[in-house]
Image: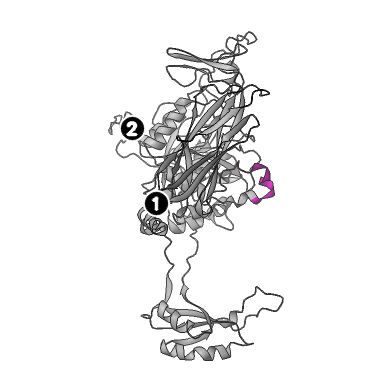
Amino acid sequence: MRLLITLLWLALLAGAGAVMAAPPTLPGRLVFKLRAGGATPTAELDAVRAALQSLQATGLTQKFPLTLPPNPEQPDGVDLRRIFEITVPPTLSLAKARAVLLASGVVEYVEPLYIRQPLYLPNDPLADSTTGAQYYLKLINAYRAWDFTKGDTSMVIGMTDTGIRYSHEDLRHQVKYNYADPINGKDDDGDGYIDNFRGWDFANNNNDPLYEGVVAHGSLTSGVVAGQADNGKGIAGVGFRCKFLPLQIFSDVGVAAFGGYEAVVYAADHGCKVINMSWGGAGGYSSFEQDVCTYAAVNRDAVLVAAAGNTPNDLLFYPASYDHVLSVSATDGADAKASFSTYSHRVDLVAPGINIFSTYGWNVQLAADSVDTDYWRSSGTSFSAPQVSGAAALVRVRFPQLTSEQVMAQLRQTADASIYRLPANAAYQGYLGTGRLNVGRAVAALNQREARVVRSSMLPPSAAGYAPGDTFQLVATVRNLLLPISGLKVTLTSLSPYVAVHQGLFEAGSLATLAEADNKALPYWLTVAATGIPVNTTATLHYHLTADNGYQSDQYVDVTLNPDYVQLNAGDLSLTLTSRGSLAYDDLAGTVGQGVSYRNSMPLLSEGDCYSLLHLRASQTACAAPTAGRASRSIRWLR
């Protein structure tokens, strides 16, 4: 019954294109191999001649008569001299031919001759798999992915970044132009944006996301995800035929506001099914930012992909560490973690991030009708994320029935976990997600499983954290995202010496695709150590998910212990007060405390140098008005 359900699920979810189809064969041609016998295959061949005659087989040919036979010191060797090719009537079924030949007792196998297709290689010179500069395409198995799908122009990837050079030879035909609102001074499509024909500049609030500064970051990331393939020029983007929507969120000259989250909403509302965010900042969790990400991912069903950061530490980096966001860290050309890359339990997967060759657009002095033709190498998680965005777009085209949540699961579960076997990654077990992106495997078939804890609720709830000696419960909700799963168990352990788990087993059982279960009837039960806990300690709890057929995965949830601050709520105003009298935060990174907010707004004081507004040791100049154009938190592109 379980097998039947699985087959029905495959047929329903994947459609005809999701199950691996048999490769084409040469009609009327078969090969068979004689079982091992004497020194030559002559005697065995005589035994099958009657069978060949009954099949009306002709053209009997020894495939490899001059090959070297194995010697006694090669027990795993093969004797290719025993393989023969025959021609049979095209109407003869393989099943009948196999039955007749195997009945002779001397034939090991009978097979058709498959026609194997070459891995697709676009004609862009820099994308050549052996001599081209885009080494990462081979590493992430993009050429094989393009055998299954080359994307589609209807699939749009929102690129929230600096401006781009849409005059570049590999970008200008890849922009998703809004023909419903041509540049005529009117809001023809009624979406509230006048003349947003080729995206929008949220940093300067205009309709021209053209890069004119000194950082070509937006052009570089856009080329990785959507550089025009098969145009005989330059590079090939991972998304191949997929289009991109340029959305400028940083000013060219550093005097305008940051508009990243506004751009995310715009992208989601304007049909982008994948949104790339190669930017972010460490610490400073924001409910507003999380809400934006939730809206785009859940309400609008967009896959959000973000760079995990270029700080080589275990830390939370936003937006990558938010819920509903695919966090991407960086590796080098040998699959080792890049020296600069952030790592954490919130990372979902990794992709190459060193010397990524892409479109540049440095020639800012070119005439308006000129075409940019320059390219450049860059490093950073900024250039890992768009590879995953391109892969997400290909998965969405290949399997349009998948939700954004399922696309993320497919990318995670098809990644190459073998990178953890490398000595260079030994210290990062569990900190590089499920492994390195493998686009070819992601688009090949829907044959993966992933169950995931989607909600963790602590009882009693505590905004600040738990004090020494506290006891609390944890309710987990798990959702099955891909193939039906059975025998699912979620075991909770503590990675902190300050938290003990007394009841740590949740038996979820069998779950159909997209079904959920929770442990409200028997929650996890935990206690906090009574003494010895440093203030504001973060304790990490580990979910280990196992199921039948060998499935297993890991997730993590953090809880704050022994907080030295309280969150005061007075009507519309909410602020953190620390034991030292500081307001908003008690550290420069903005990680201790919940800030100051008004009417549930984003934090109003989230810059590290303003953390102690009323602290006696703070200077009056520390919280001077920020420089024009400075964002409400330290957000930077991840180059």
Residue 604 image point, x, y percent = 49, 18
Q: Which residue in the structure is indicated by mark 2?
A: 195
Tag 2: amino acid: Asp
For mark 2, give the secondary structure. loop
Residue sitting nearer the eye, 534 or 166? 534
Residue at mark 1: 399
517 relative to 48, above or below: above
- Neighbours of disc 2 within 10 Å: few (<14), some (14-19), many (20+): many
**Mark count:** 2
The quadrant of the rendering that contains the N terminus is: bottom left
For marks 2 and 1 on the same chain, the one whose residue lies earlier in the sequence? 2
Return the x and y of residue 137 as percentages of the image width and height.
54, 52
- For the question of whether residue 203 can be seen, the reply is no
Foreground of the two, 365 or 114: 114
Residue 33: name its quadrant. bottom right
Observer-nearest of 632 and 449: 449
Q: Position of 425 compared to 416: left or right?
A: right
Q: Mostly what secondary structure, the magenta segment?
A: loop
Q: Amino acid at mark 1?
A: Phe
| SS category of the residue bearing label 1 | loop
Q: Nearer the viewer, residue 139 or 184?
A: 139
Residue 210 screen position, x and y as percent? 45, 34
Query: What span is colored magenta in the figure?
Result: 421-438
In this rendering, would 540 be left or right of 250?
right
